[in-house]
Amino acid sequence: MDITVLGEARYPSPLDYHVSDKARVPCSVIVDPDAPPAEELFFEVAGPREKLFFDPKKTRAGVVTCGGLCPGLNNVIRSLVLQLYHGYGVREILGFTNGYQGLDPWRGSEPIPLTPEFVEDIHKEGGTVLNTSRGPVDVSVAVDNLIRRKVDILFVVGGDGTQRGGAELFEEARSRGHALAVVGVPKTIDNDVAFVTRTFGYVTAVEEAAKAIACAHTEAHSVFNGISVVKIMGRHAGFIAAGATVASQDVNFTLVPEVPFVLDGEDGFLVALKERMLRRAHAVILVAEGAGQHLMAGGEDKYDASGNLKSKDIGIFLRDRIESYFKAEGIPFALRYFDPSYMIRSVPACADDAVLCDFYARNAVHAAMAGKTGLVIGQHHGVFTHVPIGLLASQKKQLDLNSPAWLGVLASTGQNFAQFPA
């Protein structure tokens, strides 16, 4: 996959190690001679280049964080700053606040000068020191501001919508003749970014979700016929739900967006839950926020500021239907409802995610200094890559229902009710 470059790289890199621009990583490493032939994708390998497009002494960079919170945002900001400052000698780094609206001088605050002293301890806290928001910005106004501030590089930390916005900023700058490198760091706690093995924050989310499940299990197990319903993130994909289920080993039913399920009827979820309660007198149900949307059809669709369709609240819906069902069946129960979503996404990154944040950020800096633009840092088979924003935004990643992740869920829960893979 070819990556857009701003022009000829002419400045020698101060770094000793370099990666060839010709190095590529295949999208798939599994070879099946019996499978029909398919066109293979090869991604450019990320890393420092021998020559730079930007003169570090004259370069000014900007950083913006967009969308919902995710463990590790401050780690990414810190590593971007330290790699720019110590690795390349870039001294001017601006932190634009409150998401993309910070690029609009009429809506945003004055950007924050980012220095090694400013970012020294930010990785110890959750959230983002630059704040965040959802929603687009007037691209023309934003580029006017970037040109006026003489910003050469913009790092955008966010999901696919954020990255599409970054591509629009680059295209607008190019139409003005301003050499702006826009490089994305993929951010989604749901781990649903295509062509990226794992996004930062996911492992932390699984760990925190497993803690919530442990509490839910204690509640359910400590009373007669205790039922705990736990709702966690996962608008389009059930990676967190699957990971937390296998990690905790205390979940009895896991519901994810990839697998629509039947609620009523002899083969439905409610009957399976009743059988579990009569047999074991307690149950833990884990549901991803995007699961069961087919059960709540009708009503007005609502969208967030970024234009994403909001999921209807499957947690409350499921809680209410379980209560109604068990009352109608005359079966006593004690139901507890947990929604730890905001707690999970606002904590600091765990050690594993902190390392991943650093790798993503440093590779983003390498790409930008070489004059590469319109890309997001990806990861394939343990190798960091350059993924064109247009390709990344063309699809979302979902659970493979034949993968160890989902098969582990089925083995751990033993759930048995009518489910229909989407």
Image (cartoon, helix red, strand yellow):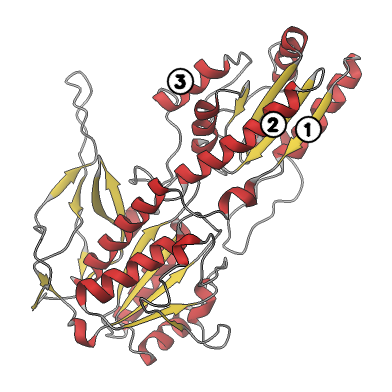
Report crowding for label 2: few under 14, some 14 to 19, many 20 or more residues within 10 A (C-alpha).
Answer: many
Look at label 2 and name its amino acid. Ala
Name which residue lies at 77% across and 46% down: 299
349 vs 263, nearest the viewer? 349
Q: Is residue 394 visible?
A: yes
For residue 2, the mark is: none
Mark 1 closeness class: few <14, some 14–19, many ≥20 residues within 10 Å: some
Name the residue: 38% across, 90% down.
149
Q: Are marks 3 and 2 in contact (CB under 8 Å)?
A: no
The answer for how far apart the CA atoms under marks 3 and 2 are is: 23 Å
Pinpoint residue 215: horizontal percent, then vertical percent.
Answer: 68, 33
For mark 2, what is the residue?
Answer: 216
Q: Secondary structure at mark 1?
A: strand
Q: Position of residue 95 (x, y in %)?
A: 44, 77
Earlier residue among tags 1 and 3: 1
The residue that mark 3 highlights is: 407
In this rendering, is residue 159 above or below 146? above
Where is mark 1, residue-wise? 336
Kind of residue sitting beneath label 1: Arg
First-in-chain label (3 vs 2):
2
Is disc 1 in contact with disc 3, using a CB cutoff of under 8 Å? no
